[in-house]
Amino acid sequence: HSLDARTAGPEGALFMALMIFEMADQGDIVLANNWSLANNDVFGMLQVGKNGKVTRRPAQNVFQELAARRGNRILKAEIAGPTYSVQALGNVPSIPNVPVLGALVTEDSAGRRTVNIVNRSPDESVKVALEDANRQPRSATVTQWHGSGTDAWNASRAESTVAADATGLTVTLPPFSFTTMT
């Protein structure tokens, strides 16, 4: 894929999610936004064609999901999972043990918790088990997007209810995916 397609597609959306996760982890962020709503080459969340047809770019889905959690309390998320290494390139040093998964956990005023999670692997699914020291979730509403291009991403949106079994609550995260579990 060209850099433009990667920026406008799922890779850019997952990068945006991970940046918001990092900002939220700081605890004193009061505003997060996307500087470009429509068109603007590859950076807009929406692409408006010459015929007026509006196409959601993957960043719009991610931003909309995270915006729905604004005002919620941010909880500490600990993730144990696979890692990968990045080789040095130009003036960017090599980075060992980069987590494949990133997460942001929020709790609304009714006590409902939402795990927003990114699987940044372009090739591998990752099975995750939700664990909570204070309570074990019995079920979760899961919404996922995944894919390597905007059309595949937009067509992939799926929502389901997952119930815990004897081992707990587990969810499989497809490659290049953004998942919310409430």
Image (tube, helix red, strand yellow):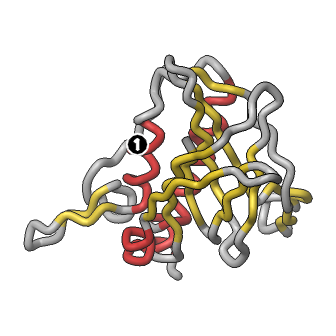
Picture residue at 56% right of the left edge, 57% below the top:
178
- Residue at image x 66%, y 37%? 22
Residue 104 in the image: above or below residue 163: above
What's the residue type where badge 1 is placed? Asn
Q: Nearer the viewer, residue 163 or 27?
A: 163
What kind of element bears circle 1? Answer: loop
Q: Return the residue found at the far left.
A: 51
Q: Quadrant of residue 137?
A: top right
Q: Is residue 65 left or right of residue 14?
A: left
Foreground of the two, 93 or 71: 71
Say whether residue 150 is left or right of residue 118. Answer: left
The foreground one among 144 and 112 is: 112
User: How dense is the environment of label 1, judged by Cα within 10 Å: few (below 14), some, or many (20 and up)?
Assistant: few
Q: Assign the C terminus to one quadrant of the image.
A: top right
* Residue at the bottom extreme, as displayed: 1
| Identity of the residue furthest to the right in this view | 96
Q: Is residue 79 left or right of residue 172?
A: right
Which percent across, then down, holds residue 122?
Answer: 66, 74
**Image x and y of residue 164, in percent:** 69, 50
Residue drawn at (62%, 52%) of the image = 163
Which residue position is annotated with label 1?
Answer: 34
Residue 117 x %, y %: 63, 50
Point out residue 37 in the picture as x, y percentages from the top left corner. 29, 48
